[in-house]
C-alpha cells in the first residue's frame, strides 16, 4: 500500500479598513497572491463571516472590527490547507 502525499499551503488573509476603503491581501506560503486590492464592504464582511467560526483558522484583529464603522481596523486570518496529491 502506497503512502498518500499532500501539498500544504499556508494561507494568510488580511483585511484593512482605513476609515474610508476596505483593502484585501492574500498570501500563500509567503508569496503575495493579492496585494492591497480595494474591495467592497459586502465582500469584506463575507470573507470575515466565512472564516470566523472555523476552529482551524487563527484570527487576530487590531481595533474593533465592524463593517460600516467610522474608525479604521485590521482583521487577519491564518489557515493551512492540505491537498491530496495523485499517486504517481
Image (spheres, rainbow, N blue to C red):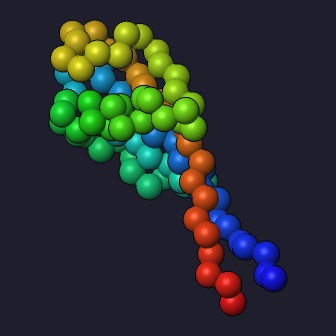
> In this rendering, does residue 66 appear at all?
yes
28 in relation to 85, above or below: above
Residue 11 location, x and y as percent? 53, 47
Which quarter shows the N terminus?
bottom right
Check the image and report above or below for 15 versus 88.
above
Q: Residue at x 79, y 81 (%)?
A: 2
> In the rendered view, would you say 1 is above or below 14?
below
Residue 86: horizontal and vertical position, in percent? 62, 81
Q: In this view, does 71 lie to the left or right of 53?
A: left
Instruction: Depth check: give the residue in front, 52 or 25.
Output: 52
Q: In this view, does 31 lie to the left or right of 47?
A: right
Residue at (55%, 32%) from the top-left corner?
A: 55
In front: 72, or 11? Answer: 11
Q: Quadrant of residue 4?
A: bottom right
Q: Which residue lies furthest to the bottom in this view?
A: 88
Q: Find residue 51 and report its image quarter.
A: top left
* Residue sitting at the far front: 1
Observer-nearest residue: 10 or 39?
Answer: 10
Relative image position of residue 27 (x, y in whole percent): 50, 49
Residue at point 61%, 69% (across, down): 84
Q: In this view, does 86 lie to the left or right of 65?
A: right
Q: Which residue is drawn at 30% across and 44% down?
A: 37
Amino acid at each position: 500500500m502506497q503512502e498518500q502525499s499532500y501539498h500544504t499551503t499556508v494561507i494568510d488573509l488580511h483585511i484593512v479598513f482605513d476609515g474610508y476603503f476596505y483593502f484585501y491581501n492574500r498570501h500563500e506560503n509567503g508569496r503575495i497572491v493579492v496585494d492591497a486590492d480595494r474591495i467592497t464592504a459586502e465582500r469584506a464582511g463575507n470573507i470575515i463571516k466565512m472564516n470566523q467560526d472555523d476552529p482551524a483558522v487563527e484570527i487576530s484583529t487590531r481595533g474593533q472590527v465592524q463593517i460600516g464603522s467610522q474608525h479604521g481596523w485590521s482583521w487577519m486570518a491564518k489557515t493551512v490547507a492540505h491537498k491530496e496529491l495523485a499517486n504517481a
